[in-house]
Image (tube, rainbow, N blue to C red):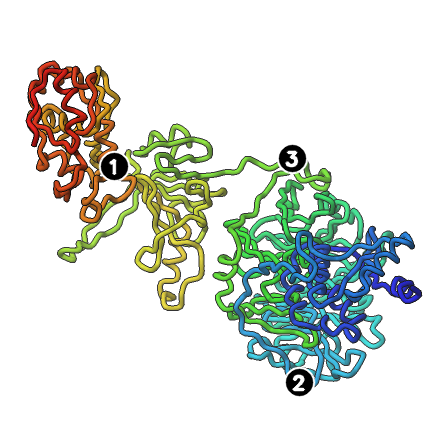
Amino acid sequence: MAEFKQIIDDALDILKFDGAVQDTLAELREKWGAQVPVLLDERFDAIGIQYMKLPHEKGAAALGQELSTFGWALYNLDDEDEYLFALIPEEERSEWERYCKKQGQYCHLMKQQGRKWGDHAKEQDPGKLMPCEEYILQDEYDYFFNSLAGDFAAGKWKNQDAEGWKSGCVADLRHRPPQVIRAHSLPHLGCLTYSAENGLYAASRAAGSGTIGRALLSKNPATLNWFEPSPIGYDGPPRTLCWADHSLWVGDPTNATRIELTDRGTCQDVKNWPLPEDGWSTKYHCGITTDGLGRVYFSNEWYKGQIYRWENGKVTKHAFSLYGYDHLSEAIPVPGTGRIYMIHAVSGKGRVEECLLELDMDTGRCRIASLSGMGEGLKLRWFTGDWLLVQGNGEILSDDFAQLINMNTREVLRIRPGMFGGEKMQHIGMLTDGTVVIVTRRDRVGPVFRYPIDFWGFLRTANKPKKLEWREYKEVYPNLPIFLPPKATERKIILKKDSLTILGSVFTPPFTLSQLAEKLGSARIVLQNGTRKSPMTGRESPYTQALALWDELGLQGWLDEDEQTIKTLGVRVAAQGEYAVRQTFDGAVWIGSKDYRETSWKDFAGFAHTLKLGGFTVYTRLPGPVPEEQSAQKAKLEALSAMVQISWKEPEKKAAKAQKYKLSKPTEPVLTFTSFNFKLAVMEVLMYEKGLLAPKLDAHEFAREYSRRKIDIDAEGYEPIPEIRKWLEKYPVPERLARSVTEIEMDGGSEIYTQLCPFWDGEDGAFDLNTITEAELRQFPNLKHITLMSSKPEQVLPVLERCSIKVDLL
């Protein structure tokens, strides 16, 4: 018992929080790996990867479940905010639980609900792995890279058996594997950043004792040729480096410095603006950003920071301050505008939710978009073209590592845990030649440099389509509510089999200019001139195409020769390509109940996609990378992806499927039969001899029309075909036709028998008349003679005699 008390005292203390199952596994191994070597089994690594995105308690339960297969029980001794783990051999479980109960000790067996002791943990799908070329640095040193920009990563290095980091290093990512340049003289570099406009790299370093910081510049970090463009010493390595045209701005807790550069990249002028010390946090580094017009903004306060604005060499206090804990350290410009993008926190479900805020620096007008799945500690930067990178802290594995957002189309691509196995993503960047590089960290290995194969295509196939959704604030910054504003009604264009809905207005084809203009407003009409080549003669002839354009909606209509009918309506969903309509549609395009990108498409000529829906034909190229073999047509193919074209043609009316043998409900009195074989004999007379019943039964024709199953007459025709028999049983014979039956001549070769049983040989008594009632006979007042086919005539002759019907036996 004393041993159990010691186990409780030595229990492993772990905080409960999301996404830490791999860290928990590492701690279990550190504490009990020598005593319980099964913990080192690869199966536990697999559980770590499978459960890394799930809540921590699910991952911990999975570890406990898997331990049970090896004869070990994992117990939690704390029912509050922490785990206190104890590991007990299976044979001691009962005694251990009795001891805990006697001592009043909380004791919960960690296993998965619904799974038995000894079962393996439930497997989870960790998601698709991103295909990459992987490289590790195979030498005798350890490396840690803190930043990546342009073609290089910056960091520090040390001997593998050393405790402290030696000096700085850079990795040239253009080489595979990356080429690392180390030097004892190179200081630890941080905050590496690159300006394509100036062809320069900037970084920060600490000098001497580490209390004085400097800003550094280099044209080629691989040469280790860095120079200090400014004599200003900072409070530690400056953490803010911001490019603005031909200037580098540097910030520390009490300084904002503008270093003006020449066209050759050398220092032309340095101006420094000392800032008042922040009363909240004296170590918060000044955040610096620019808007899309080149104006610079900076603030060094941790809470409700005063914004300073630089324009044309003059610094003034800005018209408004920052909201709450908003900072400019991660803000970036919206190109060509006086706006910025920045991270702004609101009150979310159970925690603070960091969102993307677009802020007009002149008016304070703003809008916000939720960054669901991203967590906290987010960083922003432009990735390439219209693509904005939002990078998370990479620590909580239930959150995305990063999201790429196309700020033109609002497409969101998620980079999620599990895409790199169990490794955490540290950095992502695009080299100057357009190559994407991702740096992850592998346990007991160090940094792994990954060069994705089909980066954009993979992200689109590994994720469900997602779009950034803006919400407009009525309030003006910084006087914003703590909660997100309500969602605006989503702007949608929805195509169905028989209609097209545009922003709630329903249009039915054929579409006309006046029809759309009534609901959408007047269109801008343009005429496009061009030439067509005859496929027969090869001759070119001029033509003029009239277009109806609703620019604000991104709609382009191709008009027919009457200049009223819209033969094709295009929705511009992206900015690439040259189209007459000036803007893109700021909303979602749906086909049926799905986003058009999720719908089932058919390949069209190997470079585009098409589908048919009712009388509509839709044509586009789904978003995605252009294959290398089609690279010569890249611009044209990307332009196809920017337009969804909808055409309509009156569907050809298919001939109604024949329903010759569908029986209608009778509208007049009908005859009643108790003997099916007698009914067949009557129908032979009325249907085949006199032609008074329709349709005239044809077994082959019946089989072709019958749709519930395939009737194979060749195989089934040796017995009465059930469906035909049922049809004959239900056939309503009008009462008025009874007087037409004066004589019945039963014969094995009668037509009706060969339709009911096509290959009947007449040798058995399948159609013998062996039973009949007086009531059904008296329905036929003119029936005077029957040639009887019966194997039991003694049963029917008396009935026929009573009805005065003369009988001849066959």
Kindly report which numbered mark, 2 or 1, lies closer to the viewer in this rendering.
1
Query: Cα distance, mark 2 to mark 1?
Result: 81 Å
- For residue 535, side relative to residue 412 (left or right): left
Badge 2: few (under 14), some or many (20 or more) residues near its Cα, within 10 Å? few
User: Is 702 above or below relative to 610?
Assistant: above
Disc 2 residue type (three-letter): Asp
Going from N to C along the chain, the mark reached first, 2 or 1, is 2
The x, y position of residue 568, in whole percent, is: 32, 42
Which image quadrant for residue 719? top left
User: Does 217 appear above or below 619?
Assistant: below
Residue at 57% across / 69% down in the picture? 437
| Numbered circles on residues, count | 3
Left or right of residue 35: residue 617: left
Residue 8 x, y percent position in the rendering:
88, 62
Give the label, 3 or 2, closer to the camera.
2
The amino acid type found where label 1 is placed reads: Glu
The residues tagged by marks 3 and 2 sit, at their Cα atoms, a distance apart of 58 Å
Q: Secondary structure at mark 1?
A: helix
What amino acid is labelled 3 in the image?
Answer: Lys
Residue under circle 1? 723
Name the residue tied to disc 2.
139
* Image-based side of 704 in relation to 180, left or right: left
As measured in the structure, the alpha-carbon distance from the residue carrying label 1 to the one carrying label 3 is 70 Å
Q: Which mark is residue 356?
A: none
- The location of residue 101, given as percent across then percent down, is 87, 53
For label 3, the residue is: 474
Eye-nearest disc, 1 or 3: 1
CB contact under 8 Å: marks 1 and 3: no
The residue drawn where x is 70% and y is 39% is 483
